[in-house]
Image (cartoon, rainbow, N blue to C red):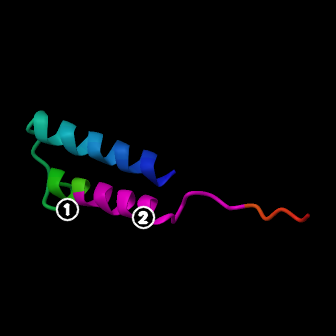
């Protein structure tokens, strides 16, 4: 799930940068990219990947 969030954030950062949209300092393309990197790092670490079901045998 966090991998998809990271992809969306990277796409938004690309659009902000490519379209040269003037935004405030909080919503700049670099900040959106850093949020995407954070979500990607959490995804790679296994956080937000879903619940692992325990099977009883």
Magenta residue check for 39: yes
Q: Secondary structure at mark 1?
A: loop
Left or right of residue 28: residue 47: right
Nearer the N terminus, badge 2 or badge 1? 1
Q: Residue furthest right?
A: 57
Q: Quadrant of residue 32?
A: bottom left
Q: Picture coordinates of residue 29 (x, y %)?
A: 17, 50
Left or right of residue 16: residue 9: right
The structure residue drawn at horizontal position 91% and vertical position 64%, both measured from the top left corner, is 57
Residue 11 versus residue 46 in the image, above or below: above
User: Crowdedness of circle 2 by 10 Å Cα count: few (<14), some, many (20+)?
Assistant: some
Closest to the observer, 9 or 40: 40
Q: Picture coordinates of residue 41 (x, y %)?
A: 36, 62
Residue 49 versus residue 9 in the image, above or below: below
Q: Secondary structure at mark 2?
A: helix
User: Crowdedness of circle 1 by 10 Å Cα count: few (<14), some, many (20+)?
Assistant: few
Cα separation between marks 2 and 1: 22 Å
Magenta extent? 34-52
Residue denoted by label 2:
42
Q: Residue furthest top?
A: 19
Q: Picture coordinates of residue 39 (x, y %)?
A: 38, 59
Magenta residue check for 2: no
Left or right of residue 13: residue 17: left
The structure residue drawn at horizontal position 76% and vertical position 61%, both measured from the top left corner, is 53
Residue denoted by label 1:
26
């Amino acid at each position: 799930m966090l991998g998809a969030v990271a992809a969306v954030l990277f796409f938004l950062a690309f659009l902000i940068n490519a379209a040269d949209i003037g935004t405030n300092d909080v919503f700049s393309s670099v900040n959106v990219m850093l949020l995407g990197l954070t979500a990607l790092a959490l995804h790679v670490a296994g956080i937000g990947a879903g619940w692992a079901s325990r099977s009883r045998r």
